[in-house]
Image (cartoon, rainbow, N blue to C red):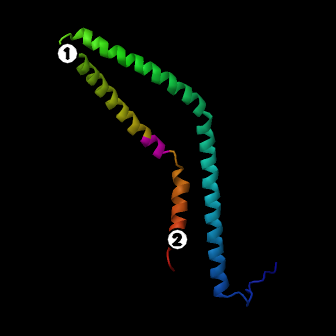
């Protein structure tokens, strides 16, 4: 079996470097395309639940308002020496504190929604491309 081990004498270092840069750019473009596709899929999944979430949010808002008023008047009935405004303040502070905790938890969940591996690889490629050689 005969093999040709001789390289083309016209291939120089410049062409090799040009090929490497071209391959790196192609890899970066492919990773960007993959990142976009993953984000589209995640967005599509999220969009499907938005309608139900909007209706649920409306129902929860009205229900929470009614229950909050009930808790204020229950507290005023249980402790008659408290003025009504203090009962409103107590219930309001408790509900606001719970809302802050839930908002922080939601923020953590949203930060984890980005595909980390693809984003990290893309970031590394961008750093490599922008770093002067």
Q: Residue at x 48, y 43 (%)?
A: 110
User: Which residue does the numbered mark 1 point to in the structure image?
Assistant: 82
Q: Quick check: is 120 in the magenta stretch?
A: no
Q: Is residue 90 left or right of residue 26?
A: left
Q: Residue at x 35, y 35 (%)?
A: 100
Badge 2: residue crowd in 10 Å (few <14, some 14–19, many ≥20)? few
Determine whether label 1 and label 2 are within 8 Å by CB: no
Nearer to us: label 1 or label 2 = 1
Badge 1: residue crowd in 10 Å (few <14, some 14–19, many ≥20)? few
Q: Is residue 80 left or right of residue 108?
A: left
The magenta stretch is 107-112
- Residue 28 sits in quarter: bottom right
User: Which residue does the numbered mark 2 point to in the structure image?
Assistant: 128
Residue lying farthest to the bottom in this orientation: 9
Q: Quadrant of the N terminus?
A: bottom right
Q: Position of residue 117 (x, y in %)?
A: 53, 54
- Main SS category, magenta section: helix
Q: Position of residue 44 (x, y in %)?
A: 63, 41
Tally of numbered tags:
2
Between 81 and 49, the residue placed more toward the observer is 81
Q: Is residue 13 left or right of residue 90?
A: right
Q: Is residue 119 left or right of residue 78?
A: right
Residue lying farthest to the right in this orientation: 1
Q: Residue at x 21, y 11 (%)?
A: 79
- Check disc 1 and report its element: helix, strand or loop: loop
């Amino acid at each position: 079996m005969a093999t040709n081990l001789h390289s083309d004498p016209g291939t120089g270092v410049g062409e090799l470097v040009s090929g490497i840069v071209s391959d790196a750019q192609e890899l970066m473009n492919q990773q960007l395309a993959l990142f976009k596709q993953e984000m589209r899929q995640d967005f599509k999944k999220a969009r499907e639940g938005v309608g139900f979430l909007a209706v649920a949010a409306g129902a929860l808002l009205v229900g929470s308002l009614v229950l909050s008023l009930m808790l204020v008047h229950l507290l005023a009935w249980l402790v008659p020496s408290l003025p009504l405004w203090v009962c409103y303040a107590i219930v309001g502070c408790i509900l606001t504190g719970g809302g802050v905790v839930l908002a922080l938890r939601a923020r953590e969940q949203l930060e984890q929604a980005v595909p980390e591996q693809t984003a990290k690889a893309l970031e590394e490629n961008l750093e490599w491309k922008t770093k002067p050689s």
